[in-house]
Image (spheres, rainbow, N blue to C red):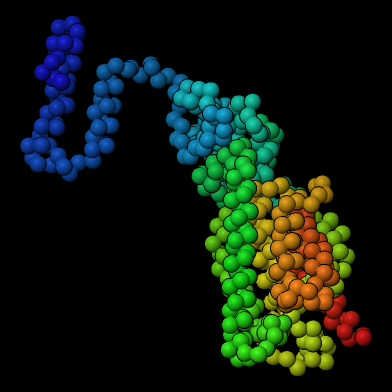
Amino acid sequence: GLAMQELCGFPVELQASVFAQLEKWRSKEVALKKDEKWQEIDFLEYTAEVLRAIDAIIYSSYHFEGVIEVKEMARVDIGENHLAIVCQGDVGIYEVESQLRRLHGKRLGVIILKSGRNTYTLRQVETFLPATLENAYLSLNLIDPAAGTRRSANRWGGSGEIGGSPRATGTSLTPQQIADAIGEAYRGPTRMRRLWSLSIGILGNAVIMVASMMSTYSLARLNDPSGSLDRYFRDQAGTYGGVLGGLTVLLMLFAIRRGRKLFGLCAPAGSDWLALLPGALLGGVAGGAWIFDVALMRPQTLLQHHWTEWAVLLGFPLVAELLFRSLLHGTLAQRFATQYSGGPWFLSWPVFISSVLYALWSLPQFLPFFSPGVELTFAAALLFGISSGMARERSESLLPCLLMHWSCLLVLVLTLSLF
């Protein structure tokens, strides 16, 4: 405290000048307290002002030669005691790197420099990290609405050491979203994160399906207590589809905040997904497509039904694809590897899991499960689900899945008109 100033060890002249300056600063504080305005000030700003004044005693301007102003916008831990920092500055990324190394030393791993209104430059400054910028590009392109498809030049990209945001449009992501995506890319999906995504996806899928079925069953049973389950679903197909669609859209609105592209809500890329069309048609026509009343599809009855029947006929495929190939697949794709247009062919976990659940939820109309047709329907639905799911990944879009489902309806209509 000021009462113990003789213990500071300063020479007499220096002590006198320093404490005279301190008294000058204290005079402002004393005046504020005397005027009863002390409680009205911004304490953080007042403290910062005093600290800057104290610094000015010790440091001269030459101490700050070569120092540039870098504004940190977001940061994230990328594992192994390294940081990825999103920042903004008026100089190039190599000058920013020099400045950030002064502050963070060996902890600095990745720099994301905002170089324009919506443009960023990325640089990996630490060689020995668990991943490279290539992994970061995949994560960023998956969630950035402004990024094009994998065959577009307007994407996050570059080398493993330096790259940037989409050139034509810039990015639609916030600095924190960029940091989070890069953090996940470098840390990689842990087993717990994968189990969590799997649990959320399956639970959400089950809640929607069970709630829709219970609503349909309860309403149908009120009207026909002695009816069968398959009759309930046939007579109340509109109710079933309406509740199923409403719940799916509601959950989609919540999940879509992660990015439309993640859930396939974009234009398709490439054409190699067309190779999956025969498998989808075979599975769909064999019983894998969601069609609840075949009689509706006979040409002589199609024109006799009200628009609600048309809505049921065309709406079920739309709801099925939104629920399984968009919502469920997109939830799992955040933690598991997937295919892409022009890339290697393989059966991904998101496709396999969503296809198995699609096939299982195609069976309740056959309760009890020893009814004829269970095995064929499950196999057909699984084949259709895998074909449609792989087309979803190869095209990066949900539209081919819808076209496949509606194509199955068209084939069945043509078949019924001929036989």
Q: Which residue appears farthest toward the right when viewing the image?
A: 419
213 sits to left or right of 58: right
Quadrant for residue 372, please give it. Answer: bottom right
Is residue 3 placed above or below 212 in the rendered structure?
above
The reply to whether residue 274 is in sight is no
64 sits to left or right of 129: left
Residue at x-position 60% and y-position 27%: 125
**Residue 369 pos. (x, y %):** 75, 73
Q: Which residue appears farthest toward the bottom when viewing the image?
A: 304
Q: How many marks?
A: 0
Residue at x-position 92% and y-position 86%: 419
- 329 or 226: nearer the viewer: 226
**Residue 109 pos. (x, y %):** 57, 29
Q: Which residue appears farthest toward the left when viewing the image?
A: 34
Residue at x-position 67% and y-position 52%: 333
- 222 or 278: nearer the viewer: 222
Quadrant for residue 205, please give it. Answer: bottom right
Is residue 409 placed above or below 23 in the rendered structure?
below
- 53 or 188: nearer the viewer: 188
**Residue 77 pos. (x, y %):** 53, 35
**Residue 222 pos. (x, y %):** 58, 89
Quadrant containing the N terminus is top left
The reply to whether residue 18 is in sight is yes
Residue at x-position 48% and y-position 25%: 104
